[in-house]
Amino acid sequence: MNFDESNHLPLFEQVAEQIEAAILSGAFPELSQIPSTTEISKQFQINPATVLKGMNLLVDKQIIEKKRGIGVFVKQGAKQIIQEEKRTYFFTQEISQLVVEAKRLDISLSELIEQIESGYQA
């Protein structure tokens, strides 16, 4: 995990994003236990309340679950939930910005598609 205090996102949101990234990469597989709030706060010298707030975001999104006295675990289906959320963001934010910028630069749809296809082939 890598936290950046100069990042525009609050630290607790960075905690949540880092855990999501670890789930997507397979570092934290579904149904596996993840480090505790205390472990993360000690390792990265972050206030435990900040880590807890980030973890609670993921609990609310049904990505992780806390098992009292046992630990925190990645829920079954967590990876799909994260992927769907990120896909939605990508299509609604990133692609729309790409299209706006392409139009501003007078890039035709066919040119844009050609560039995207060549990127996939690389």
Image: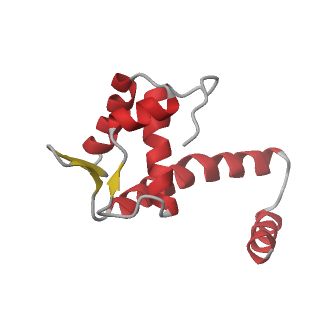
Quick check: 108 left or right of 78? right
Q: Residue at image x 40%, y 62%?
A: 79
Count of numbered badges drawn on the protein = 0
Q: Residue at image x 49%, y 27%?
A: 11
| Residue 88 appears in the figure | no
Whether 70 is drawn above or below 23: the answer is above
Quick check: 104 left or right of 95? right
Whether 31 is drawn above or below 90: the answer is below
Residue 12 pos. (x, y %): 43, 29
Quick check: 33 left or right of 110? left
Quadrant for the N terminus in the image = top right
Q: Residue at image x 78%, y 63%?
A: 112
Residue 92 pos. (x, y %): 53, 49
Quadrant for the C terminus in the image = bottom right
Name the one closer to the observer, 96 or 37.
37
Name the one closer to the observer, 26 or 100.
26
Whether 102 is drawn above or below 17: the answer is below
Residue 104 pos. (x, y %): 80, 44
Q: Residue at image x 34%, y 23%?
A: 49
